[in-house]
Image (spheres, rainbow, N blue to C red):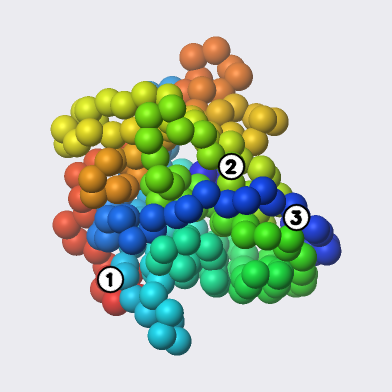
Amino acid sequence: MKRLFLTAACLVLTAAAPPPMQGERLEAGATYFILKINGHENGRLWRVLRKTELNGRRVWDIVLHLKGVGCEAREHYVVDRTSLLPIMMDSTRGRDRRDRNWERIRLRYDARRIWGTRESSAGSKTISVALNGPTWEGHLLGVTLAALPLAEGGRYALPTWHYDGGEKQITAEVVGDIVAPYDGRPAWVVEAGDGSSDRVRYEIARSPRAEMGYRVDLHAPGCVKIWETSEPVLHVSQLEARR
């Protein structure tokens, strides 16, 4: 799960041979994460993963709902349950068009392209992106890493795309293992990035497989951005639970 939220353009993405994915190993359920900057809480993210089917295809239905200081956003993804390759997404930000941050995004993905629309208070734009191989959703990076066949010293390459960040070739490496302080589960420590910005250190529970949080050390001295897993959500809204 990397930072929330292209102008329309036709892009060609290239990808190396993808690693074998193990998406069926992921843990279904609802969890929330606490966003901290310099040790101070700055928002919360609720995440719901649900197993379902779409036209007979086994999929993960994933909802991300962010509530931060001065912002609220919700993203809904449907991805293949084994490969984690995206099938569709929709995103909402802001209550109505009068909101300066109002935005609606609708995307569809297949083996050859990504297409859809991005609406904001400034107008509507078409998104059309040509693909040249398997390409994962950049904003579900933590979940996608959890589906990799992680092993000590493992190195992996993942072509990704996100509507704000465009194409990125992500490299990930297992750099260690820990016992997570929140719940005592053994976890892999995975560092990932595209080489142009800070690498992100993820904690991925071994069994059942799940993203437990991530940390970004920013350029400013002492500035640290942390997702920390808290206890599982006990009361998820009916809207989220029934999707």
In the rendered view of the protein, which quadrant contains the C terminus?
A: bottom left
Classed neighbour count for the residue bearing mark 3: other residues with Cα under 10 Å, few (<14), some (14–19), many (≥20):
many
Q: Which residue: 58% across, 36% down?
A: 171
Q: Residue at x 74, y 52 (%)?
A: 14
- Percent coordinates x, y for residue 33 in the rendering: 33, 44
User: Element under label 2?
Assistant: strand
Task: Kindly identify which residue carries mark 3.
Answer: 13
Can you give x and y, in whole percent of width and height, for residue 167 in the image?
Answer: 71, 50
Q: Is residue 88 left or right of residue 162?
A: left
Q: Amino acid at mark 3?
A: Leu
Q: Check residue 22 in the rendering and tell me which mark sits there, or answer none.
A: none
Residue furthest to the top: 221
Mark earlier in primary sequence (2, 1): 2
Disc 1 designates what residue? 241
| Residue 156 versus residue 32 in the image, above or below | above
Between the residue at mark 3 and the residue at mark 1, the CA separation in whole angstroms equals: 35 Å
In percent of width and height, residue 127 lies at 74, 68
Mark 2 is on which residue type?
Ala
Frontmost residue, 221 versus 196: 196
Judge whether 175 appears above or below 161 on screen: above
